Amino acid sequence: MFLIGSPRCAVGARRPFARNELYSYCPDEFLAVDFRKQLVAQELIAYRPDVACLQVRRPLSGAAPAAAPDPPRRMGPPQEVTQDVFDTWLAPLLAAHGFAGSYTQKTGSSAIGCATFVAARRWRIAATHAVDLTAEWAECPDLAALVNGPSEVAARLKRGLERSTTVAQAMLLESVGEGAPRRLWLLNTHLFGHPDATHVRLVQVCSLMRKAARLAAKKPAGGPAPGLVLCGDFNSLPDEGVRELLEKGAVGKEHPDWRRGTRFKPIDNRKDREQAWFDTLEAAAQSFDDLAAEVCGDIAVPAALVQACRETSITFCTDQTQQVVDYIYFSAEALAEDAGAGAFPDFDAAALTAEGGLPSRSFPSDHVALVQDLVWR
């Protein structure tokens, strides 16, 4: 059985823009890194995950064990961390609790990245690959044709991809201590966050899933088919194309995400992005039905996946918005949800906004963890 989780915590929560604009409701003492690290540690250790995926900004949660004849595995949250946080705090902390981990930094000058940990009692890390999603699309002729198109919209799409700094971890795990080993491909990522960059995220997910299929095809055959789990902060709402692409295996050229992408205009300077942040959010809420999709295509991934934690109503919460943007997906051919594990708590809006929003005295991140028990078929 696996426990899977997907949270996030803000490393830069005390920067002036974050402190004064994004998290102005949160007292300084609860934004302090040392305070939030304690909550992060408590949550990760309490969940006792078999797998923990951490993404942007600092570790948040994991998962809890459950008894089953065919022992399930657990996976913990995605959250972004810095190399220093990984080396000096997170890795030593979790090593003391029996975890081995790997860190992948974002591209360019970004100082943050993704980290994945596995319980050594359940898994052996057979291979780890860093997937550069700023360039992986170039390996797919159909995606490259879209991105290298002659229009200004295509040029902005390319610029958004190349400067997104987005990476993913692709990790091949082999089970230990359960007879014949079972293999699992684990993907961990944090997609580009601009509200109008829905087409960027489509290309990123499509290229990631194709890369995972190519990696899996290189591994020796024999034994049961490996499972696949994808965890991440997708920065995508449930009605956007990323979910359709993963669950149906394809997105057509008529999908609204292609039209919305026409509005996307990348801003390179962080200070300029911060100044334009709320204008961008306001514009994102406006209709784009009258826009023509200058860059669009029929794209597909090698196999459809199943969404875990489907009943979760909120994964991201501030005093201004509550949304679902974090997800766990798995391959139904090899894996299934453990019906006997029971439901993990789903915090409602009242609980999450009791202190204005997140982070807070009780939550170290503006995202909450997703946690899921999976079993082998």
Image: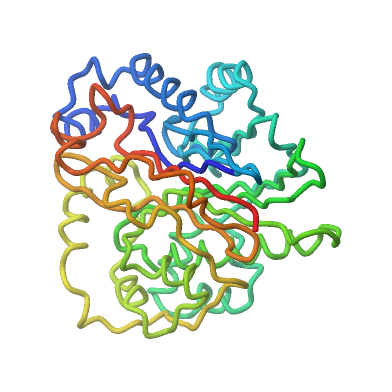
For the N terminus, the quadrant is: top right
In-image side of 211 versus 355 (left or right): right
Instruction: Give the image quarter of residue 124.
Output: top right
Residue drawn at point x = 55 percent, y = 47 percent = 188
For the C terminus, the quadrant is: bottom right
Q: Position of residue 45 (x, y in %)?
A: 49, 23
Residue drawn at point x = 58 percent, y = 43 percent = 2
Vertical order, 300 against 220 (above or below): below
Q: Position of residue 319 (x, y in %)?
A: 15, 39
In-image side of 43 versus 35 (left or right): right
Residue drawn at point x = 41 percent, y = 44 percent = 370
Vertical order, 137 against 78 (above or below): below
Q: Position of residue 121 (x, y in %)?
A: 70, 29
Tell which of 95 and 25 is nearer to you: 95
Vertical order, 140 against 235 (above or below): below
Residue positioned most to the front: 69
In-image side of 27 versus 293 (left or right): left
